Image (cartoon, grey):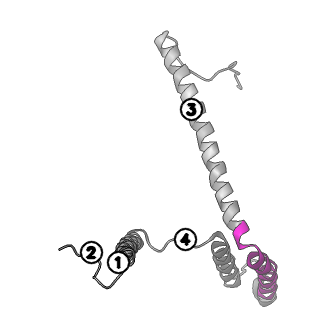
Amino acid sequence: MSEELPPSDAEPNEAVDEVRATDADAWATAVAEDLAAEKARRRTQYGPPPGSAAEELRKLVDNVAEKLSGLQSPLLGGIAGPAAQQVVKQVVQQARAAVEPVIERNPDVFDHLAAAGGELLAAYRSAVQAQEQRWSRRDETLRDRGEEPGPGGERIDLD
């Protein structure tokens, strides 16, 4: 007989619900395994994914601070060198102290700013591509008429 039929002592609806639950669990498990495999494949191919915008800002501040701290100043000479390094370290610490609370309180803001920046870049690309298409169509129209396309407007001799 069929495996989906309930045992004689169980209610029919309970057995059917149990079969559906195990099917749903199997599906969820298979999807989770596929997703994990895909993430692992992408990590090996492209490296680790970038973190949130707030995490990336922290990394940037840390890297800049590290570079500035290790920077030797040949222009200030041997006497002012240690004093200049101390000033740089103090400025870096102040910058970190100013940035960290902002990042901690508003991590989502940086994600939204990054998304807005991506949208602005997409809009700019779209505008540039549309303008390039208009220019190329104009140049093709001029070539079809036998004219040489060139810069528009009046030519000014600067010699």
Q: Closer to the N terminus: mark 4 or mark 2?
A: 2
88 left or right, relative to 132: right
**Alpha-carbon span between mark 3 and mark 4:** 33 Å
Q: Where is residue 5 in the image (x, y as percent from the top left)?
A: 26, 75
Viewer-proximal residue among 43 and 72: 43
Is 90 inside the magenta-drawn segment?
yes
Q: Closer to the N terminus: mark 1 or mark 4?
A: 1
Q: Where is residue 53 in the image (x, y as percent from the top left)?
A: 64, 69
Say which residue label 3 marks. 132
The amino acid type of the residue labelled 3 equals: Glu
State whether residue 29 is above or below residue 79: above
The residue mark sitting in front, 3 or 4, is: 4
**Alpha-carbon span between mark 1 and mark 2:** 7 Å
Disc 4 is placed on an element classified as loop
Mark 2 crowdedness (10 Å alpha carbons): few <14, some 14-19, many ≥20:
few
The magenta segment: 84-109
The residue sitting at 78% across, 85% down in the picture is 93
81 left or right, relative to 133: right
**Alpha-carbon span between mark 1 and mark 3:** 65 Å
Say which residue label 2 marks. 5
The residue sitting at 79% across, 80% down in the picture is 101
148 left or right, relative to 89: left
What's the magenta bit mostly, secondary-structure-wise? helix
Q: Where is residue 15 in the image (x, y as percent from the top left)?
A: 35, 78
Say which residue label 4 marks. 50
Q: Position of residue 75 (x, y in %)?
A: 75, 77
Disc 1 is placed on an element classified as helix
Viewer-proximal residue among 138 and 42: 42
Disc 2 is placed on an element classified as loop
**Alpha-carbon span between mark 2 and mark 3:** 67 Å
